[in-house]
Image: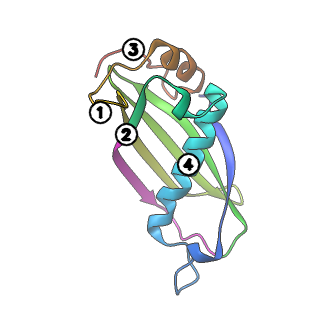
Amino acid sequence: MGYFETDVAVRYRDLDTYGHVNNAVYVTYCETARVAFLRELFDRTFDDLEHGFVVAHVEVDYRRPIGDVESVAVRVAVDHVGTTSFTTSYELLVDDETVATAETVQVVVDPDTRETRPVPDEWREVFARYSGDGDVAADD
């Protein structure tokens, strides 16, 4: 399986009163890594693409708290590409130990009408390099 990995800085404001990263911030770390991943894949921002996407589903499994550390490594992979959506998985690590896993489902939309659109062939081809299961067929 291919994946993209990036480090995301842990900011002081991410910490709660117990000195742990707030649970909602884990989703922000995933979003930050997803944006870096997509910029790397497409060598541009999604604002430059004909279609956009919206996040339709987020799921996070917490394994242990993230304390006061400098950064979290986030691994990103595309697990599935369907007709109008793609599923992205995440592994958050501190000192090479998995602290959380997550998954998001993104739905491709026309930026003007907000109507769903098929995943463009260009995206499908690029996602295949980072596919967790090799499943890039159109089968929502």
Disc nearest the viewer among 1 and 3: 1
Looking at the image, tell me whether mark 1 or mark 3 is earlier in sequence order. 1
Q: Is residue 47 magenta?
A: no
Q: Quadrant of residue 9?
A: bottom right
User: Which residue is label 2 attached to?
Assistant: 54
How far separated are the C-alphas under marks 2 and 4?
21 Å
How far separated are the C-alphas under marks 1 and 4?
30 Å
Looking at the image, tell me whether mark 4 or mark 3 is earlier in sequence order. 4
Q: Mark 1 near mark 2, Cβ–Cβ under 8 Å?
A: yes
Give 127 or 122, whichever is nearer the viewer. Answer: 122
Q: Amino acid at mark 1?
A: Arg
User: Which residue is label 4 attached to?
Assistant: 91
Local packing at callout 2 (Cα closer than 10 Å; few below 14, some 14-19, many 20+) is some
How far separated are the C-alphas under marks 1 and 2?
9 Å
Q: Position of residue 93 (x, y in %)?
A: 63, 56
Q: Mark 2 near mark 4, Cβ–Cβ under 8 Å?
A: no
Above or below, 24 against 16 in this view is above
